[in-house]
Image (cartoon, helix red, strand yellow):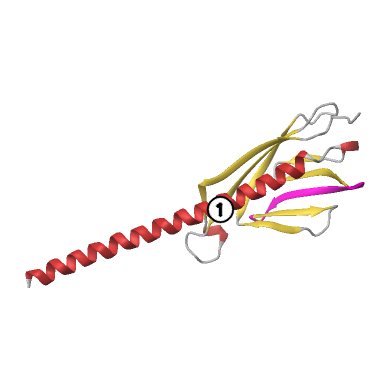
């Protein structure tokens, strides 16, 4: 009888340890996946912002949730807009409807050196949200500090090709 009780306690402890391990592993996988998504988007944004410029005041730095820069590719000049809105990062060209680049995300832009003769320095900070109640509602979510990414990039405005 005592052996059955001891066996039951050992099994109960083993199940508890296993469930804790699985929970922590899933949390680590989510954090890693969030970091990879944010890093990919941060690299893409940095590349696009770095290659953009602010000709004829074509840039907008009025909000820390939205940035508008002029993207020049293959003799085409168009406005590139990034905006954090409704826990989404939206990317659009020339004020079009745009696309949702990332979901369950928030962030902000900080820009210094916005004068006419200065080279703007853009800092992008993003963080990923996790639905802790698994009910699909971002309002009941928690910010994961371990999935916060920040990058800074200088625009090419002010440089002249000779």
Residue 156 against residue 126 in the figure, above or below: above
Q: Is residue 111 left or right of residue 157?
A: left
Give coordinates of residue 157: x percent, y percent.
83, 33
Q: Mark 1 points at which residue?
A: 34
Is residue 123 shown above or below 84?
A: above
**Who is closer to the viewer here, 14 or 138?**
14
Where is residue 128? Give x, y as percent: 57, 51
State left or right for residue 21 relative to residue 78: left
Q: For residue 76: magenta? A: yes
Instruction: Give coordinates of residue 88: x percent, y percent.
Output: 66, 55
Q: Measuring 61% from the left and 40% from the top, which residue is drawn there?
A: 150
The structure residue drawn at horizontal position 85% and vertical position 37%, both measured from the top left corner, is 54
Left/right placement of residue 49 relative to residue 143 reads right
Residues shaded magenta: 74-87
Identify which residue is drawn at 80% across, 34% down.
Answer: 156
Q: Where 79 falls versus 50 (above or below)?
A: below
Nearer-the-camera pick, 13 or 67? 13
99 horizontally vs 26: left or right: right
Q: Where, by quadrant of the figure, is residue 59 drawn?
A: top right
Crowding around mark 1 (Cα neighbors within 10 Å: few <14, some 14 to 19, many 20+) is many
Q: Residue reaching furthest left?
A: 1
Q: Which residue is drawn at 76% across and 44% down?
A: 48
SS of the residue at dot 1?
A: helix
Give the farthest residue toward the front: 162
């Amino acid at each position: 009888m005592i052996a059955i009780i001891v066996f039951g306690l050992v099994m109960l402890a083993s199940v508890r340890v296993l469930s804790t391990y699985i929970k922590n592993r899933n949390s680590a996988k989510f954090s890693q996946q969030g970091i990879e998504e944010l890093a990919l988007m941060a690299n893409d944004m940095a590349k696009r912002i770095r290659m953009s410029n602010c000709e004829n005041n074509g840039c907008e730095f009025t909000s820390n949730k939205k940035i508008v820069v002029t993207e020049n590719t293959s003799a085409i000049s168009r406005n590139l807009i990034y905006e954090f809105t409704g826990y989404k990062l939206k990317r659009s060209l020339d004020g079009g409807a745009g696309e949702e680049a990332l979901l369950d995300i928030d962030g902000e832009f900080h820009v210094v050196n916005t004068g006419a003769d200065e080279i703007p320095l853009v800092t992008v900070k993003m963080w990923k949200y996790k639905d802790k109640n698994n009910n699909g509602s971002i309002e009941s979510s928690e910010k994961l500090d371990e999935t916060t990414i920040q990058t800074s990039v200088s625009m090419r405005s002010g440089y002249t090709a000779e």
